[in-house]
Amino acid sequence: MTVSTGRTVAIAVAVLALAATAGFVLTSPPMVIERVSAAGSTAGSAALAAPQKPAGLAAAFLAGRHAQATSDSSAAVAFYDQALAFDPQNLSILTNGYFVAAQIGDFDAALAMAKKAYELDSRAGMAPVLLAVQAFKNKAYDQAWGYLSKIPQQSMNGFAMPLLKAWALAPNQPQDKAEAELAPLKNLQDMGEMVEVTQALLAEFYGNTEAALAHYDALAKRIEEQRTSIIRIVSDGYRRLGKADKAKAALEHYLSVRGRSPSVEAYLNSTTPPKKLTPQLGMSEALYAAAEMLLLNDANDFRAQVATAYAQMALYLEPDFSMAQRFVGTALAARNHFDESNAVLGSIKKSAPDWLESQVLIAENFARQKRTGEAVEILRSVAKDTSGSKDKAGDKSGWPDVYVAIGDMLRGDKKYAESAAAYDSAIKASPEGKANLWALYYSRGISYERDKKWDLAEKDFRKALELKPDEPNVLNYLGYSYLDRGEKLAEARKLIEAAYAKRPDAAEIMDSLGWMFYTVGEYDKAVQQLERAVEGAPGDGTINEHLGDAYWRVGRKSEARFQWQRALSLDIDDSQRTGLQNKLARGLAQK
C-alpha cells in the first residue's frame, strides 16, 4: 500500500501528540506491511541490520512507523525493538512489532514480542495465535488449545478459530469434539468446501477411512469448480488412503474441463508419496485455509496483511509449503513490491508442483518493472517445459496461460506480430469449450489490428462475439475500429451503443460513444459524452484529444486548445503528439 503524504503527516502528528503522554495507545489496526522474507519462513532477528539507534522512545516509535509506511519492514522491527528498550511494557509497540515481524517471517522477533504482549493482555491482537502456533510446532497441544480457547469469536482472529481450534483438539480429543468446533462455519456462505476439506482431513487423521473417503468423494464430484489448494488436498488424501485411481480420475476430469494447469498436471504425474498427515500438517493447512478465507470476499489492505501473517505461520510449521510461498509472493506483488515478491517466489523448489506457476508470477513482476525481455525469456522457458507434457487428450501444445502472458507482455512492448503468434499458440492449446476462449480471439484481434492486419483482426473480433455475443469490450473495440476506419458506420453505432448499454460508466466506452456522435456530426452530444469520459479517465491522452476536437466544433476554441495541451502532457505515441502539435498551431480544418 502506498501511504499518501497527508496520511504520513497525520500519523506523525497523532503519534507525537500521544508521545507527550507516553501512552502510544493506538486504536486503529497496524499499518499494512509491504515486505516478506525471501525464505518465507523464519528469519532470526539477529539477521536484521539494526539501523542507527534513535534518541528516545518517541523517536524510535516514529522511526518504526515510518519504516512500516515506507515498506522497510526489517528496519521497522528493529526500531520497535529499540523502542521497547525505553518502554518494555508498551502494548501498542509490542503489537505493531510482532505484527510486522510475522508478516516478514521473522518468528524469533514476532514470538518474543507476542509473549510480552500476551502477558499484558491475553486477548492482544494476534499474539495468542502466534503463541499457539509455536506451541503446536513444539507438540505442546494442550498449551496451544489454552491460547486459542481464550480468543473471542468476535475479534480480528475469530474467523479462523473454528479451523484452528479443531486441529488444536485433534491430537488429544475425540473426533466428534474436534469436528464440533467447525459448527460456526457451516451456516456461512462460501464455507461449504472449507468445512468439507477440514472434515476430510480430520477423519483421515483419526483413522476413519470410510468417512474421509466420503468427504473426498463429495469434493471430487465438483473438482472442476475447486480452487487448486483444495484439488491438492483431495489428490493427496486419496493417495494416502490407497485410492490413487480416484485421484487420477479426479485430476484428469479437472484437466479435461478446465484445460492445462501445470500444478494439477504435477499432482497427476507425481511419483513422490504425499506427506504423512500429522497434527502439524493439519494445523498448517488450517492456517493456509484461513489466509485464503480472508481474501475470498471483500479483500482489502488490512485483510491482506492479516492473510500474509497467517500464510507465514503455515510456513513456520511446514517450511516447504510451496502454495503458501506462492500466496505470500502474490500478496507482495499485489502491493507493487516486486523484488520482495520475486525473492519469495524464487525460493520455491523446482520439484514443487507450484514451481512453473511461480515462474510466471516472477515474469509478470519483471514486466511490471519494465523488464520485458527478462520476463519473456522466463515465460518462453516455461512454455518449453510445459509443451512436453500431455493432458488427458494427449495434447502436447502447451499451457495456454503462459502463451497469454507472453502475448500480453509483447503487445505491451508494441511487438504486435510476436504477440499475435503467442495468442495463436494459446488458442491452439485451449480446449474448444474453454470459458474464456473468446478473450484469446479478442486479444489476438487487437494485436492484428495494431499490426495493421485488419482482415485478420476483424475475423477474430467476429469470432470473439460469436463465442460471447454481449461482451462490451469486444463490442466497443470493433465498433470504434469501424469509426476509426470510416467504414460500416451504422453497424459501428449499433456495436458501441450495445457496449454502452452493458457498461454505461466505462470511460473508454463513453469515449467511443462520444466519438461516434462526433463522427456523424452530432457535436453537442459528443461534448456531453466526452466530458463524462474525461471525468472517468482524466489521464487518457486520446480521450482528452477527442474532447478538444469536440469543443472546437462547437466553437469553444480556448477550451479545445486547453484539452489538446493537456493531452500533450500525457502518455501518447509520437504520431499522436505530432497531430496535437498541428492542432494547437492551426486548429481544425472547416468541414
Image: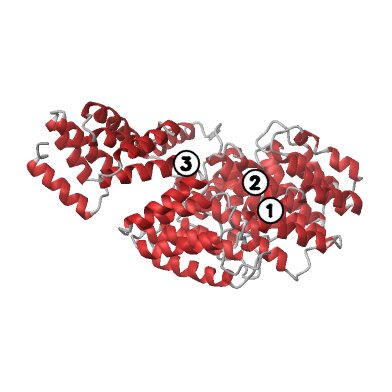
Identified at 63% across, 59% down, the residue is 41
Sequence-first tag of 2 and 3: 2
Disc 2 versus disc 3: distance between alpha carbons?
Answer: 30 Å
Residue 58's x, y, as percent? Answer: 47, 41
Dots 2 and 1: beta carbons under 8 Å?
yes
Q: Could you tell me the amino acid type at mark 2?
A: Glu
What residue does disc 3 label? 471
**Mark 3 vs mark 1: which is more N-terminal?**
1
Identify which residue, 427 or 145, lies in the foreground: 427
Nearer the observer: mark 2 or 1; the answer is 1
In-front residue for pair 214/362 = 214
- The image quadrant that residue 555 belongs to is top left
Q: In percent of the image, x 53 and y 52: which residue is there?
A: 437
The answer to whether residue 36 is visible is yes
Q: Is residue 141 left or right of residue 224?
A: right
Task: Look at mark 2 in the image and give the residue it sits on.
Answer: 292
What kind of element bears circle 3?
A: loop
User: Is tag 2's residue or tag 1's residue first in the polypeptide sequence?
Assistant: 1
- Where does the image place residue 226, in percent across and percent down from the top left? 69, 49
For residue 246, side relative to residue 111 (left or right): right
Residue at image point 46% right, 58% down? 365
Secondary-structure class at tag 2: helix
Q: Is residue 260 left or right of residue 274?
A: left
As drawn, 306 above or below 575: above
Q: Residue at x 38, y 54 (%)?
A: 457
- In x, y percent, where is residue 204? 86, 53
Identity, as a three-letter code, of the amino acid under mark 3: Glu
Q: CA distance from mark 2 to mark 1?
A: 9 Å
Question: Label 1 amino acid?
Answer: Ser
Residue corresponding to mark 1: 229
